[in-house]
Image: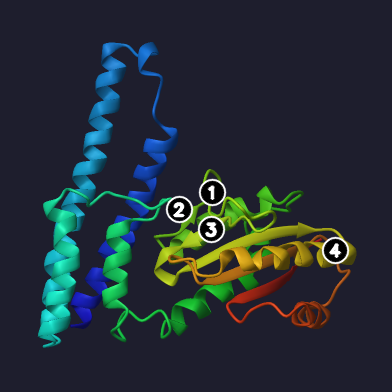
Amino acid sequence: MKYLTEKIKRIMAAFEHSHYDYMMFKEYGTPDFSNLSQEELYDYEVEEQEREEFLIYMAKKLLTLVQAYIEAKHLPNYYNAFLAEIIPFYKEGKMLSGTVDMDSELMLVYRRYLEAFDDFSIIDARKEFEILENILDSTATLLKDFGIQPKSEPEVYKPMIKICKTAFPDNKDCSHYKFQKTAKCYHPDILIPSLECAIEFKYVNDEKELNRTMDEILADVEGYKGNPSYSVFYAVFYATNSFCSSKRFNSMWAEKHFPENWKGIYVQGRQ
């Protein structure tokens, strides 16, 4: 069962990553067909078809594996309920459908049924969260090791997107992604569907700016309640100089009374 579990997780991560790329391709990659030559139009249609065929292939492979996994649990009523909800995606050709947040509707159903088991429970994913938090805590060290001394927010989060991808293949770059249209300040740079997690990096120059940014994020917290895809949120503050200690930061964060599913991380930039 361990091998089957890991195989399901790998395929789900690969599907979600490819599905996001596909949704981005459909949203932002569609050209002005009136300006395309016949050859360019053909290339576009071939690429679109190849993306769809690859996703459909993975979706069909995943169904077989998940059926085997749930059936092995000897829960016939649960198994039948799963089939009743998942099979219409395949029969009605809805395997590639996405939510307004560009998540896969198919994967949301798979996760809802699989997370009932300890092998897939987001609550028990302690090791994965420990790895993620170690990476985020080490932001300044990692950037320095790569010879990067950031001068702006994008120079912090863009390298971190690539670094996080090595540990979490389903990591999504949010540079063209509208996670919440109503948010004023918290605009995630990274989404990790397997951990139902969103991460934002902030670049701050002094304690006044740090405090103000915290308040702005706190004002947006209400807008993220009840999100069906993401339930854990990180705000990583990259400080350009030593104006605040980690202890002082933690006190400031605690005083704001953020919900339990929000975590602030203070990173001291390297001079």
Identify the amino acid type marked 2: Asp
Question: Is residue 269 something one can see in this rendering?
Answer: no
Residue lying at 80% horizontally and 83% vertically, measured from the top left: 251
> Quick one: label 2 or label 4, which is nearer the N terminus?
2
> Residue 259 sits in which quadrant?
bottom right
Real-space CA distance between mark 2 and mark 4, rounded to the nearest whole angstrom = 36 Å
- The colour scheme applied to this rendered structure is rainbow
> Quick one: label 3 or label 4, which is nearer the N terminus?
3
Per the image, the residue denoted by label 1 is 178
Cβ atoms under marks 2 and 1 closer than 8 Å: yes
Residue lying at 40% horizontally and 60% vertically, measured from the top left: 170
Per the image, the residue denoted by label 4 is 241
Pinpoint residue 23: horizontal percent, then vertical percent.
37, 44
- Between disc 1 and disc 4, the foreground one is 1
Label 3 neighbourhood size at 10 Å, few (<14), some (14-19), many (20+)? many
- Between disc 3 and disc 4, the foreground one is 3
Q: Which mark is residue 190?
A: 3
Residue lying at 43% horizontally and 65% vertically, measured from the top left: 229
Q: 220 above or below 37?
A: below
Per the image, the residue denoted by label 2 is 101
- Between disc 3 and disc 2, the foreground one is 2
Disc 3 element: strand
> Quick one: label 3 or label 2, which is nearer the N terminus?
2
Real-space CA distance between mark 2 and mark 1, rounded to the nearest whole angstrom = 7 Å
Identify the amino acid type marked 3: Ile
> Quick one: label 2 or label 1, which is nearer the N terminus?
2
Q: In which quarter of the image is the N terminus?
A: bottom left
